[in-house]
Image (cartoon, rainbow, N blue to C red):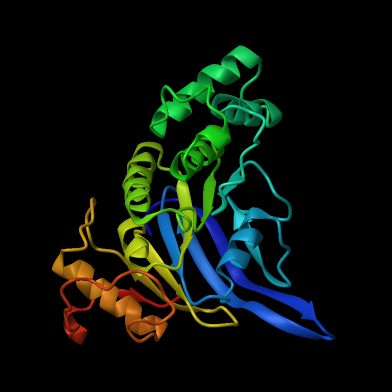
Amino acid sequence: MGAEVALVLRGLGKRFPAHGSEIVALEGIDLSVAAGEFVTIIGPSGCGKSTLLRCVGGFERPTAGSVLLDGRAVTTPGTDRMIVFQSFDQLFPWLSALENVARALRITRTVPGKAESRRVARTYLELVGLAGYEALFPHQLSGGMRQRVAIARALSVRPRVLLMDEPFGSLDALTRTTLQDELALIWQETRVTILFVTHNIEEAITQGDRIVVLTEQPGRIASVIGNPLSRPRSPEAPLFCELWDLLHSLLGFRRGGRISGAPPRRRVILEEAEAPQLATS
């Protein structure tokens, strides 16, 4: 990568005690992420994707290896790494959309003063398409709108890395597609570094400029695939279909298996010489 490296995982491993034994969630994860890069992470259920995000976020301490952000070891949570979850309940229910964002700005001291924090909060709500909805409370917003507020709140404190743990997993298909498109536009405007966990092959391709494929437990990096498709990415493109088939093969699932996401309408058989470039970390 020619760009500045923001995040480095070196030999990252995580074990959890279980009934006098251990569960190995992650093992030997080596990954470098450039500043401003959008990386998606996909793998079978239970392979440690969320655990990996929690280690980067500082919520879990690795049992092996290290996480470095701008050359400094990550040991605790910090506003330089903000996370957006799948749950719709991550907002403060007693605060309006505007105050959910403004409160975060004041707590983190990103913006001093009530008036200025509200002004900046309005800017970020506008960025995620919620101008005019500032006064509504979470229970008055749809699931997709609540996720927009969560994204606005996370971005407002200007993190180095935005961690997204299946943020659209609980949404209906139409809302999910809309938010995927909007997130891509937000990323292009802000150029924040994003690590995005998903179970959905199509989502991994549309969102990520690199796609990290994890093995079944213990989670190891099976492959890192560079995405050659230009944005916006259409599932109808032949190369999109080839990437879908490649990921499907790497994940080791038959059609109708556990990894979600409809197969492409047109199946393209990959020839080795035509496959997208594959770099194994």
Q: Is residue 73 visible?
A: no
State whether residue 85 appears in this view.
yes
Frontmost residue, 42 versus 55: 42
Counting the numbered discs, the total is 0
Residue 254, given in percent of the width and then of the height, sits at: 35, 87
**Vertically, is 67 above or below 131?**
below
Residue at 40% from the left image edge and 86% from the top image edge: 252
Q: Please state which of residues 89 and 190 is positioned toward the viewer in this rendering.
A: 89
Position in image of residue 222 (x %, y %)? 45, 80
Residue 68, how many percent across, how many down?
62, 57
Q: Position of residue 167 (x, y in %)?
A: 49, 53
On screen, residue 201 above or below 152: below
In the image as oriented, which residue stretches furthest toward the top? 115
Using the rendered view, name the quadrant where residue 2 is placed. bottom left
Q: Residue furthest front?
A: 140
Residue 66, quarter of picture: bottom right
Q: Nearer the viewer, residue 223 or 244?
A: 244
Q: Does residue 176 appear left or right of residue 89 in this picture?
A: left
Q: Residue at x 59, y 72 (%)?
A: 48
Residue positioned 35% across, 81% down in the render? 256
Pick the quarter of the image with the N terminus. Answer: bottom left
